[in-house]
Amino acid sequence: MIGALARSTEQERGRLATWDQLIGELASWQSLGRVATFWWRDDDAVEATPELETMIEMSEMTKTSIGLAAIPGSLHPSLREYLARRRTAFVLQHGFMHRNHASASSKKSEFGPGRALAVMRSELAEGWRRISTFDRALPVFVPPWNRCDSEFLAILPEAGFKGFSTYCARKSAAPAPGIEQNNTHMDIVNWRARTFVGEQAALTLAVEHLAARREGRVDPDEATGLLTHHRVHDGACWAFVRRFLDETHRHPAAQWMSPRALFPA
């Protein structure tokens, strides 16, 4: 999906974005007296690993909070123990088992059409029961593969959820009563190769969303979301994340938001 997005953008703009273009876009925000907001979501957390530690240490060094989407049905005690000593990670609910229930001809989904609503409601509740035991847990639902059935979305409020997050520019800030939606917009992993998508491709995703916000083509109030998956990152992924954080943190027209601020529970 990311490769296709990058190619589409390249065809539209004629070239992929560079670091200079990112800084130039932020300068455009600054010239208008506006601040471009960002946030960080990382998916598929289940246990404490060296990769998770690398990410958390990076977040602490740069003072950047993370929305850590954890899989309730696969949690290992080490994750809770490790995060109890950290203050920059806010835990979100990432599905239940992260298991595909879609037919072979359909796109992958865990909470998609065709499943009994009562079963999905039960899994949602059990998942939150497990996630809510974490320090700094937020009642925010992140569906696996960034998709779910519209009927499922409607039961989030009754289950006590206050937030929802998928991928690409949101169509509505409130997709259901009492639900605040904040998505991510730059996935840095090439999922076919399971490697870094590439510096210019990742920057293109960021610059395009920022420009669309500034020009009013998408919701200008939705923070631009960095999406990572620490379990599959290679060295190039980590290097990009660190530089992206550094470049944006030092710019006066950029501000990183805490998940707690984006999803006030």
Image: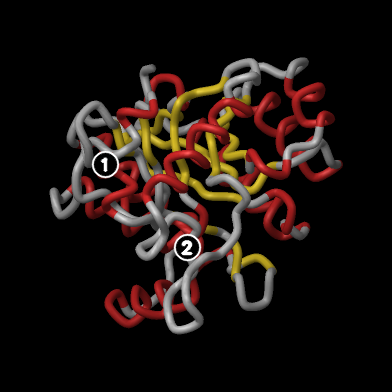
The amino acid marked with disc number 1 is Ala
Residue 64 appears in the rendering: no
| Residue furthest left in the image | 216
Q: Earlier in the sequence, mark 1 or mark 2?
A: 2
Identify the element where label 1 is drawn. Answer: helix
Give x and y (percent) for residue 92: 53, 33
Pointers 1 and 2 in contact (C-beta within 8 Å):
no
User: How far across and how far down the image is residue 18, in percent?
Assistant: 47, 62
Name the one closer to the observer, 258 or 254: 258
Vertical comparison of 207 with 74: above or below: below
Residue visible at 52% across and 65% down? Answer: 101
Q: Is residue 61 visible?
A: yes
Q: Residues within 10 Å of mark 1 (few under 14, many from 20)?
A: some
Crowding around mark 2 (Cα neighbors within 10 Å: few <14, some 14 to 19, many 20+) is many
Q: Position of residue 36 (x, y in %)?
A: 32, 36
The mark found on residue 109 in the picture is 2
- In the image, is residue 52 above or below residue 239? above
Residue type of the residue flagged with mark 2: Ser
Which of 173 and 137 lies nearest the eye of the viewer? 137
Q: Nearer the viewer, residue 211 or 5?
A: 5
- Judged from the image, the secondary structure of the residue bearing numbered disc 2 is loop
Left or right for 245, reference 222: right
Residue 154, numbered label? 1
Of residues 194 and 133, which is closer to you in this image?
133
